[in-house]
Amino acid sequence: MRYELIKTCKQTGARLGRVYTPHGFFDTPAFMPVGTQASVKGMSPDELREIGAQIILSNTYHLYMRPGEDIIRNGGGLHGFMSWSGPILTDSGGFQVFSLGNLRDIKEEGVAFKSHIDGSSHFITPEKAIEIQNDLGADIIMAFDECIPYPCEYDYAKRSLERTSRWAKRCKKAHGRPKEQALFGIIQGGVFNDLRKQSAKELMEIDFPGYALGGLSVGEPAEKMYSVLESTVPLMPGNKPRYLMGVGSPDYLIEGSIRGIDMFDCVFPTRIGRNGTVLTSGGRVIVRDAKSARSYESMDPECGCYACKNFTKAYIRHLLKANELLGLRLTTWHNLYFLLDLMKKIRQAIIDDELATFRQKFFDSFGYKNN
Amino acid sequence: MRYELIKTCKQTGARLGRVYTPHGFFDTPAFMPVGTQASVKGMSPDELREIGAQIILSNTYHLYMRPGEDIIRNGGGLHGFMSWSGPILTDSGGFQVFSLGNLRDIKEEGVAFKSHIDGSSHFITPEKAIEIQNDLGADIIMAFDECIPYPCEYDYAKRSLERTSRWAKRCKKAHGRPKEQALFGIIQGGVFNDLRKQSAKELMEIDFPGYALGGLSVGEPAEKMYSVLESTVPLMPGNKPRYLMGVGSPDYLIEGSIRGIDMFDCVFPTRIGRNGTVLTSGGRVIVRDAKSARSYESMDPECGCYACKNFTKAYIRHLLKANELLGLRLTTWHNLYFLLDLMKKIRQAIIDDELATFRQKFFDSFGYKNN
């Protein structure tokens, strides 16, 4: 894997770049659609390519549980199994395991937990998380980290990030395919800037080809996240990609890019789409609402996606109310198109040295307050 | 609407034809995918065109209930509303209303019934069924008939078909758009060949641009259905299309074509697809089965559909087990492709005067007994 820094926005400092992987490149800042179970819900690989997705993310925890990493390895790895020939990133499963709450128990060796599917007992160590990801075969894989909740006591956040550093070292050591798969370290430390600094320093000493910021967008106020980005991103190496995990709302994508982030992922656009809400040039629209019943306009008159070019809100609302699969497909399609198109506009604004201007215009139209 | 008889198979008597409608033509014998709620479940209009669908069917009862025919009329009729520019056929709602069992009450004037969605009370007359279909705007619409169950007493079947004839007359009289929409009469009479003959005669006296056979494939043995076809189809005019309603399994499509049927429809391929069963050149395959878990072959190695060209049984089985929408899409896609491809092969076999030979080969490979 190689990161190429192409240009920095003079107005904001945001970075335009390109990441080369064994399965092709992706342009940054990039948004990665999430295919939790080896499928971006409702979308075919061809459709993802058509709307401009260059890299997708899949979840190690879910795939380990079902169908199991050996079935995927024998099916040609994730690329072959799901018929996606472009770059893929897998998370480490850490976030999902820590989200299990009472179903898991954290030890220095690893984490014991029960399956959300059948209640069976499992024990994931950093080594095991890497072994699974080696089997899945993604181009970028993630170190096994502890993702703390918000709010979290300072002392626990400190002890946790130090364990995450020790686990990161074990992950690097266990990595069996370093030439084919780039292993990223994950900076933790909650909303405490000095802890983030400590975490970044410890991980950089281990030396990874890329770094992520984990444990953000987990309920903290936006200002706290921006403060962490502003204090931590400058500590991250300029010649490697920077990935803000689990972030995907339009404002966070713009604000994150401005603060030097190169990669994002989130289930947000696909999830709200399935619930009948779409992102448009004029803000969020609840297509499922009664208001849409006789609205014979597209969801977003300014959008060029397949759903907006061919169907009205009245039809899509009918599909959603009638539980028709096509309704979920069309709202998902549109929302992903909207975010991938937003990333293209962000990259163009970096080229034009006017990302701050773009932000102002976007927020005015979308109805956000500029903060 | 105009029916063109192109050729008759010398080996079987099956008819090759073409039906011209205000929204283009379709080749016969034709299978019509069912879009019950103005959407063929999981498929986009573009995909339907891609797999060779030339005409689709939608259900008046469901659309009357939700979203309501006025919303569809104001959205440009069904063609505009669902963005399908080709021919459409709507049924009359009769079959669905009569399927409601205890929720409906049949009178000479019409049928009183309660909605399956909210329990609200409705009264559908032949005139109302036509008025709704005029609003929906399909190219071919159907008379409001009584669809009797199997088995059924001779006396009831006779009284019922006579009422269906009286209703057919009222439907023709009520039809407000005869130049744009072809109204088909529906021959009833259960499995009693003399009653079918009576029904056909009465309907032909009213004179419709096309005729359907209703109330078949409702549980009767295949032989009884074939007997009705053999005795009734010869009574139907040769210069008008003949439509066998609710029939869509591969054997029935072949046997129906051989007996002179031009049009078919059924939810069978889409429904079994969603349940994880697919039709293949070697017979039915339950992709959802554990057997498929490590099967890295396509569902049908002889199939050229998108699903078979790109994905393995192992992947599709995983998607189905994990409740991923893409799994339902791929099995549906394949099954519709399989049946539409079968119709192409039937039409080619008619051109080649060897439909009986084709039937034998198909049944040998598919695992049916030739009857």
Image: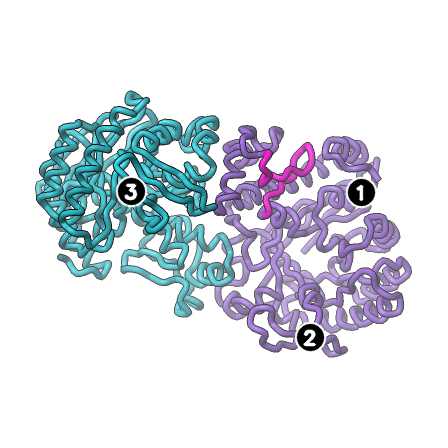
Chain colours: A purple, B cyan
Chain of the residue on which disc 1 is drawn: A
For the residue pair A130 and A339, the one nearer the viewer reads as: A339
Inter-mark Cα distance, 3 to 1: 69 Å
Mark 3: few/some/many CA within 10 Å (<14, 14-19, 20+): some
**Which residue is the site of mark 3?**
B106
Chain of the residue on which disc 3 is drawn: B
The residue under label 2 is which amino acid type? Thr
Instruction: Answer with the quarter of the image where residue A114 lies.
Output: bottom right
The local secondary structure at tag 2 comes to loop
| Stretch of the chain drawn in magenta | A275-291
For the residues bearing labels 1 and 2, Cβ distance under 8 angstroms: no
Instruction: Answer with the quarter of the image where residue A302 lies.
Output: top right
Give me the residue at 55% from left, 46% from top: A48
Indicate which label's residue lies in the foreground, 2 or 3: 3
**Viewport quadrant of the C terminus of chain B:** bottom left
N-terminal-most mark, 1 or 2: 2
Classify B182 as above or below B253. Answer: above
The residue under label 1 is which amino acid type? Ile
**Which residue is the site of mark 1?**
A258
Inter-mark Cα distance, 1 to 2: 35 Å
Do circles 2 and 3 both sit on a common chain?
A: no
Answer left or right for A107 relative to B263: right
**Which residue is the site of mark 2?**
A125
The residue under label 3 is which amino acid type? Ile
Chain of the residue on which disc 2 is drawn: A
Give me the residue at 80% from left, 67% from top: A206
